[in-house]
Image (cartoon, rainbow, N blue to C red):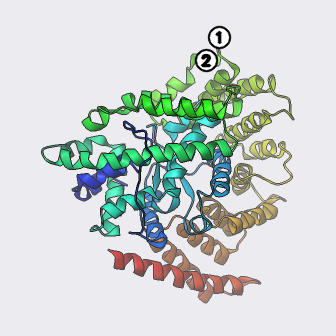
Amino acid sequence: MKTKTLKPLLRSPKWVLTVLVCALGMQPAWTQNNALPTLGNSEGISLGAERKLGDRIARELYRDPDYLEDPVLDEYIQRLWAPLVKAAVARGELSPELQERFAWRILLGRDRSVNAFALPGGYLGVHLGLIAVVSSNDELASVLAHELSHVTQRHIARSMDEQGKMTPLLIGSMILGALAISKNPQAATGLMVGGQAAAIQSQLRYSRDMEREADRVGFGVLADAGYDTQGFVGMFAKLQQAAGVNDNGAFPYLRSHPLTTERIADMQSRLQLNNSTARPSTDLAQAMMAARARAMSQNSPEALKAWTQDGKATSAQATPAQKAGALYAATLAHLQLRNASEAERTATALSGVVSSLVLPNAPQSDALRLVTLLQAEVAAKNDRFAQALKTLESLNHTTLPRPELMATAEAFLRLPEQPGRTKITQLLREQVTLNPHDAQAWNTLARLLAMQGQMLASLRAEGEAQMARMDWSGAVDRFRAAQDWAKNNRLQAGDHIEASIVDARLRQTQALVREMQTER
């Protein structure tokens, strides 16, 4: 998603700023009244139409170079997200129909800004910059609860009621434009001029109400999901600081309304009513996930070198969590700088810090697992795949969690014939059957199948990976290649079923391409 290609779409500042303040729910908030607002209804757009609009936007986000597929961070986010969805269902905030019709997918972005946003149709975006600054799972969960509430309350659909004369295609373009502006605010400096400012400001009141409602609903969801609601207050404080750091002067109206102390006070009053008590803040696993986000969002040599020299790694005054985070980030930074020996040194130091604090069956044992996964990652990045495989096997899982499954499959792809390759291939098949939108697993499965001479199944898996990323044209290309292979080669046992599936999937994707072309 290149900002320069979206400039022609940014000619309606009224909608763009509505989306920036509402859909990008973690932008600075606004002054509140005591009464809860009447936000209207969302009859102007059906669930199906909103899902299609979300699909259209997500297709572009999947193409964005900043889109990130990382099994470790994906698992971390999903572990926080699942209890929130369950709580929203139990509270009646998330209806069965909405749960079935919407996507409910979280897309990670390799962006240093502290932000998250809700999109139509149940898509959410989370920047690595947000994960990097949180100091507890509860803080990050509070953001996810807030964004989940934007979706369950259908805030974007309500905004679209106000823009009834706009086509879904134009609205989708405007949202993409707003996201582009969030990455490159200079693109919007020309919007806040003349009489346009008054039109933009008239929309902000509606967004204030939405933010307040998302706070209120999100707080209840967070509490019912078992998280410490102190996370809301802690996160608000970080966002207030981030608003000043991220503000480059492009949005004077936003700058004149910083993240309100009233919102923080409202959360504090809810905490008192909820009798919330603070929990221990030291969480080694969370500290390492924040460190992973920091290191993976920085790709310049200067920034990476800074992570390798973090004084907290050796400071006597640093807490165990700070030491663990600093050593974890340093290890990843060394890997990206191609400094194998230093990466091994810091990974060994990290293992020593965590092992001295955590018993194997203790509540913090997740931290030991993350260290082992990192050690396997170091070995693989240094082309020692047999060592990576041995390290992963030391975890002794009865069933392989997704990070271990993906790392093990990658090791098998780089090693000569191994006895466990067939089993890993079967586990990947099970993974994509249960999670058909797992594009990364489909791609890995395609490579393993090709290595084993199962070309038809491999080409089909490549097509399914493109489908998972909503690249309909790319999927058509791969399914056609699979169809051609089936016509020109002798089919093996089981290939006839695979060929039938390919034919059906090709027809489906061709229909999606025609629909996409019609929408244009």
Residue 396 appears at what percent x and percent y?
86, 46
Quarter where residue 276 is shown? top right
**Badge 2, how many Cα within 10 Å: few under 14, some, many 20+?**
some
Whether residues under marks 1 and 2 lie with C-beta atoms below 8 angstroms apart, the answer is no
Q: Is residue 120 above or below residue 182?
A: below
Q: Which residue was labeled with disc 1?
A: 317
Disc 1 residue crowd, few under 14, some 14–19, many 20+, Cα 10 Å = few
Q: Give the residue type at disc 2.
A: Lys
132 with respect to 491 (left or right): left
- Residue 462 lies, in percent from the top left, at 58, 69
User: Mark on residue 78?
Assistant: none
Q: Residue at x 49, y 50 (%)?
A: 125
Name the quarter where the N terminus is drawn.
bottom left
- Nearest the camera: 13 or 328? 13
- Is residue 71 placed above or below 358 in the rendered structure? below
Residue at image mark 2: 312
Query: Element under label 1?
Result: loop
In the image, which is nearer the foreground, mark 1 or mark 2?
A: 1
Q: Which residue lies at the image location 36% right of the left edge and 44% below the top edge?
A: 182
Q: Amino acid at mark 1?
A: Gln
Residue furthest left in the image:
194
| Residue 311 position in % (x across, y down) | 58, 16
Q: Quadrant of the C terminus?
A: bottom left
The residue positioned 74% from the left and 49% from the top of the image is 404
- Which of 134 and 38 lies nearest the eye of the viewer? 38
